[in-house]
Amino acid sequence: MLVCGRSPCLSARLGQLIAIFIATTAIGTSSRAQETSADTGTEFWTQVQGAVSVLDTRTDTPVQRLNVGAQFGARPERFGLFLNVEMNRSVDFGRVSPDVDFIQVGPGLDYFWKERRLRSSISAGPTFLTRDSGGEPAGKRGWFVDVRPISVRYALESGAVFELTPLAVDISKTQDEFTMYGNFVIVAYEWTSR
């Protein structure tokens, strides 16, 4: 189990996450030459999502994290920019540490490959505690990094897409004494317009 309280493993983990994102993007870029692109103009999109952590650690304690959120963005071609907004609840069922409720808000970058059936994305930004927790006041700021190396997309109808991310990695610093490291399964539904 990986715990990144005040240890130097956080920098190593961030480096690994960025390397995974770059590698998946490079694979997608090399496969682009084999694909015929149907991209015509900028598309604007909204996505709603729900997630549950498969493994989440906080201060040497395994916890469960639930998350609901939305993304809003624009994609001129295969690359796109978006705003990621997520509400998180981290629950320690053993009651060793307090529950933590926080919001993540930050910009992101995504990339499509394999005829838009696969998506890779990364986002980062501030976190805000939504209620007092562990001696920290509501409103306290931290930071997060969210990496989704591969999301599988299935077109349901014109402008709508079901997306499954089998493994997303999220690192969140919400309080001074600990950093949360979570692996998530994410289910999302997206509407697109041009």
Image (cartoon, helix red, strand yellow):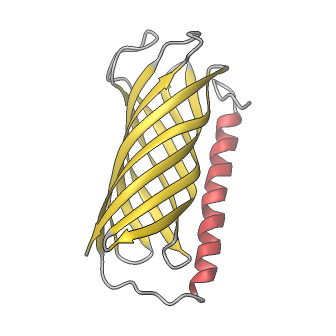
Residue drawn at point x = 36 percent, y = 14 percent: 132
Residue drawn at point x = 57 percent, y = 22 percent: 178
Quadrant in which residue 11 is drawn: top right
Decide if residue 85 is in sight here. no
Decide if residue 99 is in sight here. yes
Foreground: 103 or 191? 191
Foreground: 151 or 148? 151
Q: Quadrant of the N terminus?
A: top right
Measured as percent of width and height from the top left, residue 154 is found at 47, 67
**In the picture shown, does residue 99 fall above or below 111?**
above
Decide if residue 13 is on the left or right side of residue 129. right
Measured as percent of width and height from the top left, residue 94 is found at 60, 12
**In the picture shown, does residue 51 fall above or below 100?**
below
Residue drawn at point x = 34 percent, y = 71 percent: 157
Decide if residue 7 is on the left or right side of residue 183. right
Q: Residue furthest front?
A: 156
Q: Residue furthest right?
A: 1
Residue drawn at point x = 50 percent, y = 90 percent: 36
What is the count of numbered marks?
0
Measured as percent of width and height from the top left, residue 166 is found at 59, 52
Decide if residue 23 is on the left or right side of residue 71. right
Foreground: 69 or 27? 69
**In the picture shown, does residue 83 fall above or below 145?**
below
Foreground: 137 or 43? 43
Q: Quadrant of the C terminus?
A: bottom left
**In the picture shown, does residue 141 fall above or below 20?**
above
